[in-house]
Image: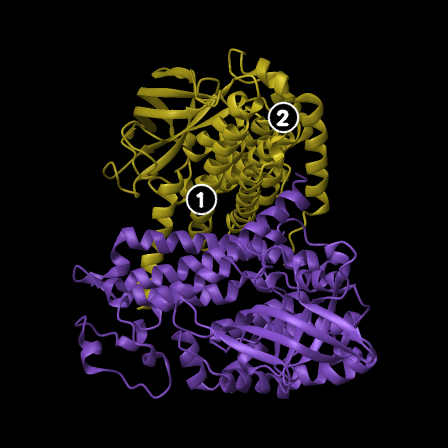
Amino acid sequence: MDLNFTAEERAFREDVRQFVRANLPDALAKKVLGGKRLGKEEVLTWHRILFRKGWVGYTWPREFGGTGWTAVQRHIFEEECAAAGTPPLLPFGLVMVGPVIMEFGNSAQKERFLPHILSGEDWWCQGYSEPGSGSDLASLQMRAERRGDHYVVNGVKTWNTLGQHANWIFCLVRTNTQVRQQAGISFLLIDMKSPGIRVRPIRLLDGEYDVNEVWLENVEVPLENLVGEEDKGWTYAKYLLGHERTGIAAVGRSKRELRRLKRIAQEQRAGGRPLIEDARFRDRIAQVEIELMALDITCLRVLAAESENRTPGPEASVLKIRGSEIQQSLSELMMLAVGQNALPYVPEALTDGWHGDAFLDGLDGQDAPFLDRAPLAGAYFSDRKCTIYGGSNEIQRNIISQMILGL
Amino acid sequence: MDFRFSDEQTQLKELLDRFLTKEYSFETRRQIVQEASGFSRTMWRKFAELGLLGVGLPEAHGGFGGGAVDALVVMEAFGRALVVEPYAGAVLLCGGLLRDVGSDAQKAQWLPALTGGAFLFAFAHYEPGGRYELNRVATRAERQGAGYVLSGRKSLVQHGGSADYLIVSARTAGERDDPEGLSLFVVAAGAPGVSRRDYVTQDEQRAAEVVLDGVAVAEILRVGPEGQAFPAIERAVDFAIAASCAEAVGCMSALNAATVDYAKTRKQFGVPIGKFQALQHRMADMFIHTEQARSMAYLAAVKAHAEDAAERRRAVSAAKALVGQSARYVGQQAVQLHGGMGVTDELAVSHYFKRLTAINLTFGDAEHHLARFSDQLLVEEKSRG
C-alpha cells in the first residue's frame, strides 16, 4: 500500500501547475477564489485557453482530440485547476453529451459535434428533467413523433443549467408509448435556434438565474440528430450517468474552499481574537477537514481501481453523497464565520464594476471588505442544490441499498 | 499510489480469514471469554505458530517483519472475528516499544519470547484521575544504587492481570503533566511490590489496576534513554491507534453484513424489513460510514510510519476521530435495525457494538482526537500567518 503519487505523476502535476500559473488570468482566478459570479465569456475564456493547449478534452481519448490521460492524471489536473481557482469547465458537452456521441453516435455526428465541443463553439445544455419527472426520470413525457425526415417534438424540460447561453440541447424524449417506460425513450440532439423553442429563466433562492425551463412546441428535429437507435435512449442516459465518477466528489474544489474557510476564520474576529482561536468554531472546521481527508482517500481508492482496470468497488457511490455534503458544510461554515455580517443582500457586489461601498465596508468595523463576505450567504443557499442534482442523495442511497447491499 | 496489499499481506489475510473462520466462531469466543484469564492460551500459542505475534517486529528477533499495514490486515481480521486475545497490547504496543527504543541486548532477550508466545507483555501507562492525556504520569522511578525504585498506580492496563511482564512508564524527572522526564521499565509482574486487580471490561476483554509499591528495578531493565520516553510512547500509541482503527473497520464490516442479512430475512407486515426505504437508507449510511472509516484506517496505517511526528499525529487523530464517529453510528444502528434481538446478549450484534464502543474509549475518543487535530490545525494556520 502506497498513498504517494509516482515520480511521473508528480512531474505531471508540476507541468499542470506551471501551465495554469502561467495562463490563468489573475482577474479570473481572483473572482473564482472570492466566490464571485462568472459570465459566459469568462467561462469560455478558460475553456479556450485549455483548448489551445490541447487539454480541454482532458477526459477524452486521443482519437477524438482528447488528451488520453489516465484516471490519475485527470484527477491531478482537476486538483490543480481547482486549487488555482480556474473557472469550471462545463460538463454538458465535455462530460455528458460528448462521451455519448463518441460511444453511440454515427461518424457524421462525431465529425459534426465533437470538434465544436472542444473548441467551445457549441455550448451544450441538458434536457433531462421535466416538471413531472425528476428522480423518476424514466416517466418523462416530452414527445417526439416521426414525420417524414424529421421528428416533431413537444414538451417541457426543466432544471436546464445555463441553457440561456446554449446553442444545442441534448434531450431524452419519448418515441414509443406502447412499451414499458424505459424502452420508449430516445436521445435527440436539438438546435436551440429551432423555431418553437422558448427558454424561461427560473429565479433561484439566491436570486440568480442559473437554470431554466425549456419549452418545445412542434419543434422539428432532423432524423439525423437521433443518437444511436430509436427507443434505446435510456441505455445511453445511464451510460452518461455512470460516466462521471471521481469528478463528482469535487475533492479539489472542497480543498480550495476549506483553505478559504480557514482564511475567513483567521480574518474574522470574535471577542477581539481571531475566530479560528475559538475552539468551538475551529472544531467544526476540523470536523469537515477530517471528512474531506476520508473522501480524498476514498476518491483515490476509486482512481486506483480504475487505473488497474478494475471496476471501482462500492466505494464509488460514496463520492457523490459525501462530496456534496462536504461542499454544503463548507459553504455553511463560511457564512457562519462572518455571522450577521452575511445578511446584507447586495447582488451588484458580485458583478463586475462594483468598487465597494463605504458604509458596507465599514459596517463591521473590520478589515475584510464587504466584497469578501457578499457571496457567502448566497453560496450557502445555492449549495443546497448539491444534494439534489445529479441524482438526489436519496436516490444515491437507493442505489447503494439495491446495487451494493442487495436489498 | 496503490491500495493493494503486497503478496505477503494477501497471504497473511487469507491465512487469517481461513484460520478464524474455522477456529474462532462466535460460540468459541463465548467459551474463551469464560476462561480465567479472559482469553485462550491455546489460541495464543496458535497465533504464535502462525507467526502473528511477530507482525511488525524485526525478523532478526523472531519477528515477521512488516509494519502498520501488516498490522492493519491482522487487526481488521481480528475485528471481524471479535478476537479477545491481547494482541494489540502485547505485540503492537509492547513489542513496538522494545523494537523502537530497546537496546540490542533487550531485543534479543525479550522479543523472541514475546513473538514465540512464551511471555505475555502488557503496557502499564495510564493512571487514575486522568483521561486520555499520555503525558499525565505521577508514578515515580527514584534512583537507588544501581537501579530504580518504582512507586505509583497504573489503571486500565489491558490484560495486565495475565501479563508476565509489564512495560511501565514512570517519572524519573519533572512534574505530573510534563512530557519530559518519563522513562520506561520492564517489570516482572510477580516482582515484590507489584499488586494487581484484574477485572472484565464492558467488551468482555480484561484489564487490571496495578499498584507499584517500592518496586526495585535494575538499570538494565530501563528501556530507552532516561527521561526521554514520551516521543516513543506517543509513537507506539499512535501505531496502536492506527491498528485499532482497522479493528473497528473489521467490526463494522461484520455488523453491516449481519444487519443486511437480518433485514433480508426478518419479515414484518408480510415483507422482509429490508424492503422499507427508511431502513434501506440507514443501511446505506452504515455502508458509507464504513467505507470512509476504511479509507482513514488506510491513511493512519501508512502515516503511522511518518518521520514527521506532526504529520503522523494529524493523520492518526483524524482517523481515530472519524472512525469513532462511524463506529458509533454503525454500532447503534445495527442494534436498532435488529430490533429487540439487537439488545440481547444472544446475537453477536450487541458484542460488536460493545467492542466498537470500547475501541472509541481507548487511546482517546472521537472528541479527544478531534480536539487534538483541531489544536494542530490552529498551530499550522498560525505558522502560515
Q: Name the residue under label 2.
A: B266
- Indicate the position of residue A301 as horizontal and vertical percent values: 62, 54
Query: Which chain is tinted yellow?
Result: B
The residue depicted at 44 percent of the width and 52 percent of the height is: A290
| SS type, badge 2 | loop
Q: Which amino acid does label 2 sit on?
A: Arg
Of residues A79 and A161, the one nearer the viewer is: A161
The residue depicted at 19 percent of the width and 72 percent of the height is: A366
- Asked whether residue A310 appears in the rendered view, the answer is no
In the displayed structure, B232 sits above or below A162; it is above
Q: How crowded is mark 2: few (under 14 residues within 10 Å), some or many (20 or more)?
A: few
Of residues A80 and B284, the one nearer the viewer is: B284
- Indicate the position of residue A15 as horizontal and vertical percent values: 59, 78
Q: Residues within 10 Å of mark 1 (few under 14, many from 20)?
A: many
| SS type, badge 1 | helix
Residue A307's image quarter?
bottom right
Query: What is the quadrant of the C terminus of chain A in the image?
Result: top right
2 and 1 marks on the same chain = yes
In the picture, measured across the screen, residue A76 lies left or right of residue B50, that is left
The residue depicted at 32 percent of the width and 58 percent of the height is: B379
Query: Which chain is tinted purple?
Result: A
- Asked whether residue A169 appears in the rendered view, the answer is yes
Please identify, in this view, whether the residue under mark 2 or under mark 1 is nearer the observer: 2
- Indicate the position of residue B282 as horizontal and vertical percent values: 53, 39
* Tag shown at residue B235: 1
- Colour pattern of the rendering: by chain
Q: How far apart are marks 2 and 1 (CA)?
A: 46 Å
Chain identifier of the residue bearing label 1 in the image: B
In the displayed structure, B379 sits above or below B78; it is below
Residue A11's image quarter?
bottom right
The residue depicted at 72 percent of the width and 73 percent of the height is: A188
